[in-house]
Image: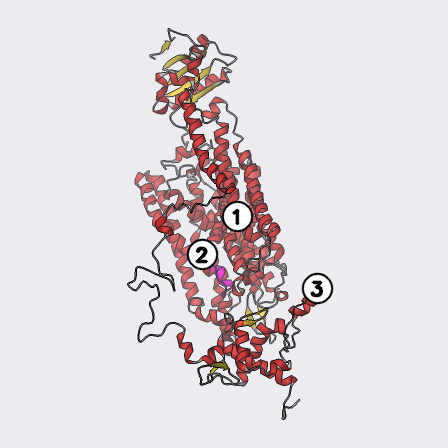
Amino acid sequence: MDTETETTPNVEGELYGVLAEFDSPGSLVKAARQVRDAGYTEFDCYSPFPVHGIDEAMGIKRTILPVIVFTLGSLGTFGGAYLEWWMNAYNWPWNVSGKPLWSIPANVPIAYETTILASVLTTFFAMWMLNKLPQVWHPFFKLDRFTKATDDGFFLGIEAGDKKFDQRVTAELLEKAGATAVESCHYEPDPDRRKMPRWIWAFIIATTVMAMIPFALIAKARASKSGLPHYHIFPDMDFQPKAKSDSAFDEFQDGRANRGEIPGTVARGYLKEDDPAFWWGLGDNGDGTKSWITGLPDRVVPTPALLACGQERFHIYCGPCHGDDGQGDGTVPTHLQQIGKAWAVANLTDPSKVTLPNGQIFNTISNGRNTMRGYASQIPVEDRWAIVLYVRALQRTQHPGPGDKP
Amino acid sequence: MKTLTVDEKIKADSLGRSMVKYGLAVGAVVLILSIVLGGTEHDHFQRFQYGALTAWMFVFTLCLGSLFIVMIHHLVRAKWDTVLLRVAENVASAFPLVAALGLIVFAPMFLGNHHLYFWDSWHQLPKDLQHDEAFKILQKKGTWLSSSAFILRYALYMAIYSGMSLYFSRQSRKEDETGDKKIAERLRVVAGPMVLLYALTTVMAGFDLTMSLSPEWYSSIYSVNLFGGAMCGTWAFLTLLTRAIQRTGKLTNVVTREHYHDTGKWVFSWNFFWAYTAFSPLLLIWYSNIPEEVVWYRYRWAGTDWQALTYVVIFAVWIFPYVALLSRWTKRILPLLMAVCFEQLLAHYIDLYWNVMPNVNWGHREDGLTTGPLTGPFTQHAWHFAASDLLSLIAFFALFLAAVGTRMKGNLVPIKNRTLNASMAFENY
């Protein structure tokens, strides 16, 4: 084999080690095994791609990476679960659609994701640390031959710091192991040139400082007051030409955002004006004023079925406060009284309520009164009239007229 | 790189014959015993049928998983598992016999016994009850879920599975003889469309075979979960089967610890796939809390006899094997791996039992009329031990081994496969 042993003539610096080149991954593995068997420990292999079996050949122990990942991954699981419990069940209890504040099914997905996040980050950074990365410089970089390590060269380097290292004996061992070339490598003799160039330091410091600027500005803004207007990064998004109701709008010829009624059309919801008694419980007095109707709208025909519907709706929506018989003693005020609080709920069979016109009762159901809120969004109009009918029936039981059977 | 020495260690010889002999003997005797014991339940053999369905599903899913392993092997041009390929092919190509075994479960439907599937039974209720609100969904599904349509689909599924598995098996054996390199390439090309066909068939088969036991309930991910359990059980089964074959002195020079390490990895990953697909419908159904959806879980959970079994499923199918197989070294100690695989295989049966058996007790109204599975008070759904379940499992498993035995002949590895040497030299770095 055409083996050449070079000793660099102008040796000035301290010896770092020897580097041997091999022609194939197979011979590299074989050589690594021989070097290991010869008792060397401070050596490393360099190849353009991972070589199967090189770990075993070099005598490298199995990595502890799985243990680290398992530990921190588990921490991710329980940390995520703890985060959810602390936020949603402990620090700020928040009822989401009636689910328990803390439950396993709802909290599994987040804990699962935090497990993955913690495992991935741990794998990535622990791998770097265990491999002593990033390594920006290495003594072998000086050797021209070594650039082939990223292309088609397979190298084995033994450091001079190894207990068994002897420049001549070690070089012979590598030659015998099938190296195509063996070369010794020396540190840079000039100590100043071994340091990182100043401009790199300057660059790192400058970029680090520059990266702090946004955070500094944010911190300053949070701690100080300013009379200046907002800075608009995207002014065309902040100030868009758009028509907002009842405001000026230059894009239309008349300068108004409102477009007015189009002849021959009825705006959405305006058909209700045809039947104010049904929709709002209002009757026309004939002189332009309106008042609550005392009868029923034309569309509401009192039937036993409607009354039964009213009873059912009443028990669902009104009963909890007003009581199922309208006496103002529902479970909510009763419970509040038991725990020493008070909430006045109207007795619907009180004479003052009996005299109310139907329209006003309907309006109260729709829009609420005092602490009672409106039910227009929950109860359809027909059902609200059914409830009015049922309230009337309840009042009749307390104030029977002539002819009512007890 | 190792090369194969073709000797008696890779020949099946009498292995298949003894599997058939003992499997058939044990299977036939225990099956008869199971039917007799099923008769003592005095429920028109309903409990026996449910136990037999569970046991048949167990062997069916093992076949199903093996077929998938064979197809994926060709599809991705796998190298490491070539030494296990023939064993998987032998299990998968027992499909025609497994399909015939299924008739023990499904044939009674045509002999006047309507106690397996409720959709096969509710037509016998009084006419006015059939038009009850409760049966509206069943009315809509009426044509699909009828015994004639069911058996047609059963025949179709089994024809597809049997055809695919026999095709792969025969081509592979042809390669043994001729060494034709084009065969492997052709199998790779057809494996793609076949995997699609397989997926479609498996989704429908899962819906028909076990999900329709509670015909008013449905979940579109159900069959995916069933498939995940099948794959997990299959890898455990193949690991045990290969090891058992090695104990008879075969394959000892071919299959190494490295291959077992990898089958262990597969058990591990399918184990988590099962857990993932089991949890996802649970989360959605639990959260939306819609009565007709939660009912399936309600009868397996709070307040019922089945709750303890649900805990067993969670721990036996997922948590225990997951933790046990998490580490590299547990997969490389063969006795330990075999123990976990055995547990995982048993847990696969428990999972199927948990899917099937809570449907066995049908609810009854006050007037005594049947309202179907997952209806009525929990007290009507109490669990009781039935020896016929256990005997059915033994019988079907023995008959399944006999069916696999009929395929165990010739070479136990594909001797002319171009990836065989790479597979034999395979190592986990």
The residue type indicated by label 1 comes to: Ile
CA gap between label 2 and label 3 equals 68 Å
Q: Do the residues labelled 2 and 3 touch (CB within 8 Å)?
A: no
Residue located at (46% from left, 38% from top): A217
Residue B99's tag is 2
The residue type indicated by label 3 comes to: Ile
Q: Is any part of residue B204 visible from this angle?
A: yes
Verify whether residue B215 appears in magenta. Answer: yes
Chain bearing mark 3 = A
Instruction: Name the colour scheme.
Output: secondary structure
Residue located at (49% from left, 47% from top): B273
Element assignment for label 2: helix
Residue B386's tag is none
In the image, is residue B280 above or below residue B213? above
Q: Please tell me which residue lies in front, A145 or B335.
A: A145
CA gap between label 1 and label 3 equals 39 Å
Q: Name the residue under label 3.
A: A339
Nearest to N terminus: mark 1 or mark 3:
1
Q: Name the residue under label 1.
A: A110
Horizontally, residue A252 falls left or right of residue B211, namely left
Return the x and y of residue A359 as percentages of the image width and height. Answer: 52, 80
In the image, is residue B353 above or below residue A126? below
Chain bearing mark 2 = B
Q: Is any part of residue B19 visible from this angle?
A: no
Q: Please tell me which residue lies in front, B260 or B246.
A: B260
